[in-house]
Amino acid sequence: MGVLERLFGKGGEESQQTPDELHAFALKQTGNPEEALRCLTKALGIDPERPDIWLDKGNVLHILGSDKEAMRCYDRALDIDARFYQAWCNKGNLLFASERYQEARECYDKALEIKPADEKAKQGKRDAWYNQANAALRAKRLEEAIEAYDRALEVDTRFCEAWANKAAAFGGLGRHREAIESYDAALEINPSDRLAQEGKRIAQSFLEGEK
């Protein structure tokens, strides 16, 4: 008997199958997310206490563009297993994509409690702080932007773009000496960064004009 016949029976009749069989079959449907979703939904109908299957159902729903439903699946996985690292990461990624940076950071923090050395979660947390800072910078909330850049730099001290944008925020506040220090930090990481070079030159000219 073939795989499909064993899973779904001959002639469309339902056959007995385990959640593991349905889950494994769904994971092979890389080009057919609708069929994968059907298998995962059926598996959860048999055993709704499987966080790994809820996670993969959320992933498939995300592929299909149903992010709200995907979020519910990740939440269900975490209701079952609050230490499910990948569910925290995937939930954080969805929140990040929706520009809900604070909530995304909270998810990455949870992931890092489980796997403190995980680089993907660290990068997600760093980027969430960075994007929140950029949003504050665009809105001219400069003190808030500087604080958020600092939090990104706590995660990654060699984040050149964060140093340069922090310098721009200092410049907007007229704190040109601190701007130069931040531009210097950016240029130490990437000496060829032309925006940082130009920003430092402008900050120096303002500082000289204050003398």
Image: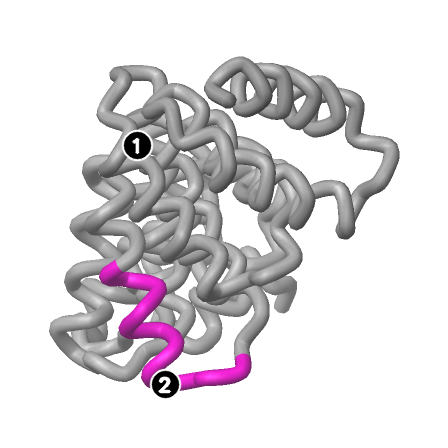
Q: Are marks 2 and 1 in contact (CB under 8 Å)?
A: no
Find residue 129 and report its horizontal and vertical position in percent.
37, 47
Which residue is depicted at the point 51% across and 66% down?
A: 6
Amino acid carrying label 1: it is Glu
* Residue 93 appears left or right of 67: right
Which residue: 53% across, 42% down?
162
Disc 2 to disc 1, how far (Cα)? Answer: 24 Å
Secondary structure predominantly adopted by residues drawn in magenta: helix
Q: SS for tag 1?
A: loop
Residue bearing mark 2: 114
Which of the 4 image quadrants contains residue 47? bottom left
Residue 111 versus residue 127 in the image, above or below: below
Measuring from the top left, give residue 113's x and y in whole percent: 33, 83
For disc 1, the neighbor class at 10 Å (few under 14, some 14 to 19, many from 20) is some
The N terminus appears in which quarter of the rendering? bottom right
Q: Nearer the viewer, residue 136 or 48?
A: 136
Of residues 131 and 68, the one nearer the viewer is: 131
The circle on residue 139 is none
Residue 175: x and y in percent read: 40, 31
Its colouring scheme is: one colour
Residue labelled with disc 1: 99
In this view, which residue lies farthest toward the right? 192
Give the mark, 2 or 1, whose residue is nearer the N terminus.
1
- The region drawn magenta spans 106-117
Give above or below for 86 relative to 208. below
